[in-house]
Each structure stands twice: as structure tokens, then as C-alpha cells.
């Protein structure tokens, strides 16, 4: 009997992730069903990873995003996603489609190209969530938080409120922009996040959306759904689900929320 080698014989999925983050790959590998492999290209550009031109008719992808796309083009991938919530939120309305259009020719024969913004949009609609409670990571500054609320409003979702996670005494007094550089991304705890979401989720919310692909959270999705009795969607969960769907992989994944069982 051969040992498990994580070969993507059912689907190979490429994801562009932030260069200094460990969370996206860890969460994807935790959730991916057997026969699905995950392949990451790291991006160091600032958000958004593709910049609008002067009249917002097209975007120009960052150099390292293009380099990763050229490498992915040779890998016979079934789907590729830009796994970066901030780029979609800061890029704003139309950015996702413009970025997919700019990258698709570079990615060659890759059948499906998407973004975290498009993935979350599809996931919210699949779970019939219209008034999500939006939860954001502590390293999102005020401008990014405002961009997030505006982004979902522009896409037809009336957020029922939002929460920027309080990372605790050790990190609370640091500016949001300093948290990742000081190591907060590698010291994330999911139990306080669970407690804050459970306490703050308003009754009028018909679901919870945890944005930010570097925001560690998939370990608590199931518990939150059981306690809140509402769908709970996260950035990485949504992108994996969307890529599995378009790749024809229909296996139900247990333990990470109702979305991955649809």
C-alpha cells in the first residue's frame, strides 16, 4: 500500500498569498479533501495587488503577482485564486473582475481564475446570507475597515454590523499597521476570537463573515455555527469551497462549517 503523498489527482489549486503569512496554507491544507493539492505563490506587493489605471478601466498587476502567474501557467492547475481579502476590499467595486481579466491570459490554460472577493460573494449567496456580521482582523486600519464595509454594500450585502478583533493586552496599544511586523500574525489565538464573535453578533445578522486570509479562524467555524445557529463563512474556507466547486470536486468536508458540506 502506497503512503499518502498529497498528490492532486482530483484537483490542483493555486493560491496567491501574502509573502510573510503562514495561515492561508495551514488552513487550506487542514480543510482540503483527499486528492486535492494546494500550491502557493507569495506576493509582497501592497494592497491592492493590481493597481487601477487613471480612469479605472483596467488594472496593472504587481510584478511578483505576474511572476507567480507565469509559474502557475506551467503547472496544469484546475483553479487559481488571489487569496487576499485586502486587495479585493481596497480595490473596490469592479477590481475583482478587472484583475481576473488581466491575469487570465498570463495563466494560459488554467480553467478558472478568481479572487477572494469573488469567492466570498459566491459563498454568501450560496448560503443565502444577505446581512452578514463582518469580522475583520486587528491589522486592518480604519481605512481598510471602511473599505470593507463599503465593498460589501456595493455588492448588495447590508452588513448587520462589524467587529475589528481585539488582539489582547499585548497587542492592543500598537497601531494596526505595526501588528504583523511585530509578530501578531504568528501568535493568533482562536478561543478569544470565538468569544468576541459570539458576544458581539447582532440578532439581525443572518450570518457571520470573517474576512482576511491571514486571519486564523477556521478551527472555530463549526462551533460558532452551532452556537449562533447561522452560517459562518471565512475567507480561506470560501476560496477553497469555490475552487473545489469549479474543479468538479464534490466531497463534503466535515468540521469546517456548513459551506463545505454544500
Image (tube, rainbow, N blue to C red):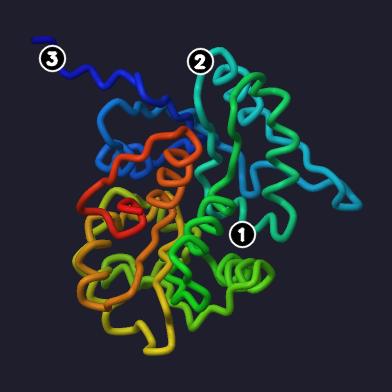
Residue drawn at (23%, 76%) of the image: 195
Q: Position of residue 39 (x, y in %)?
A: 42, 26
| Circle 1 residue | 89
Graded by Cα atoms within 10 Å as few (under 14), some (14 to 19) or many (20 or more), the crowding at tag 1 reads: many
- Disc 3 versus disc 1: nearer the observer: 3
Give the answer, above or below, for where 13 lies relative to 28.
Answer: above
Label 1, secondary structure: give it.
helix
Precedes in sequence: disc 3 or disc 1: 3
Residue drawn 62% across the image and 69% down it: 143
Please report the residue visible at 53 percent of the width from the left and 78 percent of the height from the top. 159
Q: Earlier in the sequence, mark 3 or mark 2?
A: 3
Q: Which mark is residue 75?
A: 2
Which class describes the residues within 10 Å of circle 3: few (<14), some (14-19), or many (20+)? few
Mark 2 or 1, closer to the camera: 2
Locate residue 133: give its quadrant: bottom left
**Residue located 74% across and 37% down the image:** 101
Q: Which mark is residue 3?
A: 3
Quadrant, the C terminus: bottom left
Residue 259: give x, y in percent of width and height: 36, 57
130 or 152, nearer to the observer: 130
- Labels 2 and 1 touching (C-beta < 8 A): no
User: Badges 3 and 1: C-beta atoms under 8 Å apart?
Assistant: no
Which of the marked residues, 2 or 1, is nearer the chain's N terminus?
2
What's the CA distance linking mark 3 and mark 1?
41 Å
Pick out the residue farthest to the bottom: 203
Amino acid at each position: 500500500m502506497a503512503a499518502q503523498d498529497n498528490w492532486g489527482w482530483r484537483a490542483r489549486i493555486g493560491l496567491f498569498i501574502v509573502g510573510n503569512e503562514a495561515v492561508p496554507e495551514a488552513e487550506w491544507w487542514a480543510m482540503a479533501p483527499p486528492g486535492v493539492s494546494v500550491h502557493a505563490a507569495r506576493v509582497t506587493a501592497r494592497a491592492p495587488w493590481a493597481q487601477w489605471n487613471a480612469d479605472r478601466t483596467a488594472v496593472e498587476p504587481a510584478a511578483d503577482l505576474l511572476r507567480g502567474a507565469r509559474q502557475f501557467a506551467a503547472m496544469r492547475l484546475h483553479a487559481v485564486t488571489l487569496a487576499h481579502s485586502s486587495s479585493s476590499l481596497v480595490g473596490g467595486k469592479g477590481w475583482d473582475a478587472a484583475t481576473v481579466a488581466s491575469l487570465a491570459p498570463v495563466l494560459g490554460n488554467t480553467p478558472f481564475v478568481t479572487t477572494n472577493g469573488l469567492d466570498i460573494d459566491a459563498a454568501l449567496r450560496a448560503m443565502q446570507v444577505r446581512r452578514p456580521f463582518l469580522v475583520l482582523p486587528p491589522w486592518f486600519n480604519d481605512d481598510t475597515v471602511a473599505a470593507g464595509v463599503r465593498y460589501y454594500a456595493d455588492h448588495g450585502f447590508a452588513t448587520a454590523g462589524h467587529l475589528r478583533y481585539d488582539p489582547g493586552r499585548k497587542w492592543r496599544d500598537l497601531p494596526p499597521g505595526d501588528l504583523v511586523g511585530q509578530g501578531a500574525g504568528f501568535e493568533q489565538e482562536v478561543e478569544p476570537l470565538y468569544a468576541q464573535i459570539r458576544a458581539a453578533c447582532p440578532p439581525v445578522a443572518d450570518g457571520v463573515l470573517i474576512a482576511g486570509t491571514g486571519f486564523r479562524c477556521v478551527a472555530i467555524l463549526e462551533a460558532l455555527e452551532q452556537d449562533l445557529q447561522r452560517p459562518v463563512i471565512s475567507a480561506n474556507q470560501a476560496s477553497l469551497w469555490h475552487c473545489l466547486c469549479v474543479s468538479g470536486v464534490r466531497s463534503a468536508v466535515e468540521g469546517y462549517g456548513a459551506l463545505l458540506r454544500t
